[in-house]
Image (tube, rainbow, N blue to C red):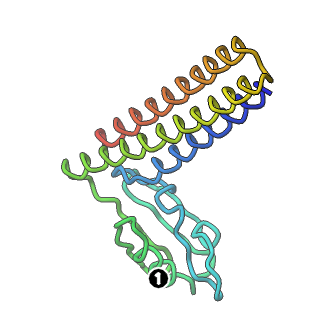
């Protein structure tokens, strides 16, 4: 029973961590990355498809993304989808490919991005702490119902805390890496 609670808590916490990493990858740092275009849907034959399913995305240089559609008729739709998205980049359509130049970040924008990444990180930490609280409540309930002893309850809560500390450290590491990336570009 305790093992199940710990494994369940770890899985949920790791899912929070992976969501954080995904959200951080979508923050524009002044460096070209295909992750910037994740979530952009393009209208193609009356259905919305992810951009990477209608075109190839390449990074020929650090500040340039090239989108080459497999079907040239979808170029205007890709351009429209990029304009509608919240990435804040202006596409250049030359009739065969779309070029997305990535402008360098201003100091002010760097600070905003750092604050945003810290807020995202804090939300992930809160989610992990909530998972810890739920797991500890399950353990306490089991102890109250005499399914496990008080000693088992205490040691299980300590182990849950160790898992929590480990994942919060991983969040801090991911945030530090992202902050460094934002400051360097």
Task: Say left or right for 171 vs 54.
Answer: left
In which quadrant is the N terminus drawn?
top right
Q: Does residue 158 lie above or below 37 as drawn?
A: above
Q: How many marks?
A: 1
**Nearer to me, 64 or 38:** 38
Q: How far from the left and from the top, in percent, is residue 180?
A: 34, 35
Q: Is residue 72 left or right of residue 33?
A: right
Q: Quadrant of residue 45?
A: bottom right
- Left/right placement of residue 119 relative to residue 151 reads left
User: Residue at position x 52%, y 23% from top?
Assistant: 165
- Tell me the residue at 44%/73% (across/down): 82
Which is more toward the observer, 47 or 63? Answer: 47
x and y percentages locating residue 3 in the rendered image: 77, 25
Q: Residues within 10 Å of mark 1 (few under 14, many from 20)?
A: few
Q: Nearer the viewer, residue 74 or 122?
A: 122
- Which element type, helix, strand or loop, lies under badge 1? loop
Residue depicted at 39% across the width and 64% down the height: 87
Give the residue displayed 19% in from the left and 47% down from the top.
107
- Look at the image and tell me in which quarter the C terminus lies: top left
Is 55 located above or below residue 13 in the figure? Answer: below
Residue lying at the far front of the rendered structure: 145
What residue would you read off at disc 1?
Answer: 95
How far across and how far down the image is residue 16, in percent? 57, 42
Up-down: is 30 above or below 7?
Answer: below
Measured from the top left, where is residue 90 in percent x and y?
Answer: 34, 72
Q: Is residue 71 above or below residue 110?
A: below
- Foreground residue among 141 and 14: 141
Hey, which residue is sitting farthest top in the picture?
151
Would you say 111 lies left or right of 172 here?
left
């Amino acid at each position: 029973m305790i093992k199940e609670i710990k494994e369940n808590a770890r899985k949920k916490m790791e899912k929070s961590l992976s969501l954080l990493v995904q959200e951080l990858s979508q923050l524009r740092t002044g460096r070209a990355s295909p992750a910037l275009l994740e979530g952009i849907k393009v209208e193609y034959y009356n259905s919305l498809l992810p951009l990477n399913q209608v075109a190839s995305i390449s990074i020929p240089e650090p500040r340039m993304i090239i989108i080459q559609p497999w079907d040239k008729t979808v170029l205007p739709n890709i351009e429209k989808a990029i304009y509608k998205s919240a990435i804040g980049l202006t596409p250049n359509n030359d009739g065969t490919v779309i070029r997305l130049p990535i402008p360098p970040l201003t100091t002010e924008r760097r600070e905003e991005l750092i604050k945003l990444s810290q807020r995202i990180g804090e939300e992930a930490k809160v989610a992990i702490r909530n998972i810890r609280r739920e797991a500890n409540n399950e353990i306490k309930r089991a102890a109250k119902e005499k399914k496990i002893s008080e000693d088992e309850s205490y040691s299980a809560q300590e182990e849950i805390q160790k898992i929590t500390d480990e994942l919060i450290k991983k969040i801090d590491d991911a945030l530090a890496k992202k902050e460094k990336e934002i400051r360097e570009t």
